[in-house]
């Protein structure tokens, strides 16, 4: 028998609960603050934006939360996702390391994002909401939510970051096909969008600006809620299906990872694969956890841990996170989903506590790793996911240089079939790197 490269689970092995690390943290998270009063948020403060069941998950003290049957029914359309051993890549790198990857690109939208989109649409439908408003960078989140809204009978409005709207017309078509309406952000539909357009008519947009537009849309329409594809605790929670499955599959492979890697935008695919392993670390025996972010938008490695707004127009609660400042507009790198000034507060906290490491990678090296991966492992990755591949390749090369084998597990968060324009630019020699120029990071002043 040839050695296996693919590790699969049956439907009955799909996790039936999400894993919540909040009750296991050695120090509690700093609470989100009301932006007006600076007092800790109450669940009522969040009700204009989210349904109560999701608000409860945001602060939940239970270690496990059952996944509702209707959400499981949808998960079963593509979950469990496969885990692969990258034997061909290992050989090409001539490394003693074993490289495994959990492939989330088999979902209908092509990434990990539907894991939370489906749950969020479900809870909003139960709360009697008619429409969800959201932002999208690369279009992956927007298409995931468009799909989820379609499946649960909700309308969906997507504010798509201008540069991605122009670079990725087919993502837009996908969202339209699933019934969503899509606007380039900044748009003239909202007060905050009009403000940005007045100051910078040719703005490329950013996730921070698009979030302001979607939050404003939801807050000004009683039948509409807001939905966020990353950053928040309930999003991290829903994504833990990734790491739970990966653990079972690594058991099948008969190995334990020494290092677990994910690319990092707001933190949801990284949290998804890493959080179940955080519990092992808190028990004293977990792997290293490495977040791979772009040098153009290095919130974890160059940001400040501070209370800041999640959006540009300062409409969201203040959250304690690594941030480059809510006014930071990252350069137009092709990994649109990594162009976010902030980071999940939960993962920021775990970085501060020393459980998560972070490293920044430049765009060109990431594309080089993505193409190398595609040529050996066959899958053409999303530009976001290429950051995780780049980190995994560097680990594998370090294993070779040091003569120390190790087991590497990374999350391949999505495929790049709608990102061919960026591959065209890379292969045509037209892509450039952007270094982050250190700047004064502007965060709101806090009373002691
Ligand atoms: C394929 C893919 N990976 C990663 C990300 C980054 O988001 P997060 O850090 O929440 O996983 C995105 C965001 O759009 C994405 O589309």
Image (cartoon, rainbow, N blue to C red):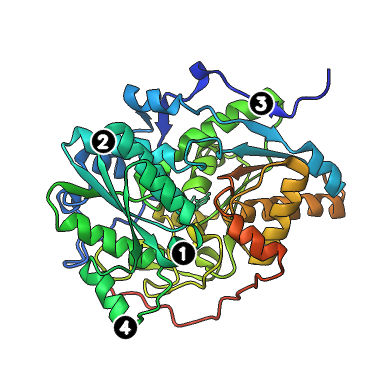
Q: Is mark 4 within 8 Å of ligand 1?
A: no
Of the numbered discs 3 and 2, the one sitting upstream in the chain is 3
> Pointer 4: what residue?
199
Give the side of residue 37 with respect to residue 296, left or right: left
Q: Is mark 3 within 8 Å of ligand 1?
A: no
Rounded to the nearest angstrom, the CA distance separating label 3 from label 2 is: 32 Å
> Pointer 2: what residue?
123
Q: Is mark 2 within 8 Å of ligand 1?
A: no
Q: Nearer the viewer, residue 297 or 368?
A: 368
**Quadrant of the rendered image containing residue 177:** top left
Residue 65 rendering spot, x and y as whole percentages: 35, 30
Residue located at (19% from left, 48% from top) = 224
Q: Residues within 10 Å of mark 4 (few under 14, many from 20)?
A: few
Q: Is mark 1 within 8 Å of ligand 1?
A: no
Of the numbered discs 1 and 2, the one sitting upstream in the chain is 2
Rounded to the nearest angstrom, the CA distance separating label 4 from label 2 is: 38 Å
Rounded to the nearest angstrom, the CA distance separating label 1 from label 2 is: 32 Å
Local SS, label 2: helix
* Picture quarter with the N terminus: top right
Q: Is residue 22 visible?
A: no
Q: Is residue 328 above or below residue 120?
A: below
Q: Residues within 10 Å of mark 2 (few under 14, many from 20)?
A: some
Of the numbered discs 4 and 1, the one sitting upstream in the chain is 1
Rounded to the nearest angstrom, the CA distance separating label 4 from label 1 is: 20 Å
Dot in front, 3 or 1 = 1
> Pointer 3: what residue?
7
Residue 297 rendering spot, x and y as whole percentages: 52, 68
> In the rendering, which numbered label is found on residue 166?
1
């Amino acid at each position: 028998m040839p050695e296996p490269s693919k590790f699969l689970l049956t439907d009955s092995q799909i996790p039936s609960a999400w894993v919540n690390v909040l009750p296991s943290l050695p120090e509690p998270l700093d609470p989100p603050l009301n932006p007006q009063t600076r007092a800790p948020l109450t669940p009522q403060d969040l009700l204009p934006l989210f349904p109560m069941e999701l608000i409860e998950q945001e602060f939940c003290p239970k270690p496990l939360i059952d996944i509702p049957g209707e959400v499981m029914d949808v998960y079963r359309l593509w979950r469990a996702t496969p885990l692969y051993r990258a034997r061909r890549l290992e050989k090409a790198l001539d490394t003693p390391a074993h490289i495994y990857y959990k492939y989330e690109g088999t979902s209908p939208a092509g990434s990990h994002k539907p894991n939370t989109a489906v749950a969020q649409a479900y809870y909003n439908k139960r709360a009697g909401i008619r429409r969800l408003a959201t932002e999208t960078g690369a279009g992956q989140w927007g298409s995931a939510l468009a799909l989820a809204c379609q499946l649960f009978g909700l309308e969906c409005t997507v504010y798509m970051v201008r540069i991605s709207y122009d670079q990725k017309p087919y993502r837009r078509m996908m969202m339209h096909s699933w019934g969503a309406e899509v606007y380039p952000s900044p748009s003239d539909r909202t007060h905050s969008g009009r403000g940005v357009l007045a100051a910078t008519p040719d703005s490329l947009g950013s996730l921070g600006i698009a979030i302001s537009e979607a939050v404003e849309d939801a807050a000004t329409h009683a039948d509409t809620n807001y939905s966020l594809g990353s950053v928040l605790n309930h999003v991290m929670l829903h994504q833990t299906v990734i790491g739970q499955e990966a653990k079972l599959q690594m058991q099948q492979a008969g190995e334990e990872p020494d290092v677990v890697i994910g690319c990092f935008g707001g933190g949801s695919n990284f949290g998804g694969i890493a959080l179940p392993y955080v519990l092992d670390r808190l028990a004293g025996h977990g792997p290293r956890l490495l977040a791979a972010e772009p040098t153009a938008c290095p919130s974890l490695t160059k940001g400040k841990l501070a209370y800041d707004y999640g959006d540009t127009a300062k409409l969201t609660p203040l959250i304690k996170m690594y941030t480059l400042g809510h006014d930071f507009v990252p350069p137009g790198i092709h990994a649109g989903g990594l162009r976010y000034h902030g980071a999940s507060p939960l993962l920021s906290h775990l970085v501060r506590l020393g459980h998560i490491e972070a490293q920044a990678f430049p765009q060109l090296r990431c594309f080089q790793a993505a193409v190398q991966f595609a040529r050996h492992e066959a899958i053409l990755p999303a530009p976001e996911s290429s950051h995780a591949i780049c980190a995994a390749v560097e680990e594998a090369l370090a294993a070779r240089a040091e003569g120390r084998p190790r087991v590497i597990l990374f999350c391949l968060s999505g495929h790049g079939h709608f990102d061919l324009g960026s591959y065209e630019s890379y292969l045509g020699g037209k892509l450039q790197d952007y270094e982050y120029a250190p700047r004064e990071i502007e965060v709101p002043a806090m009373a002691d």
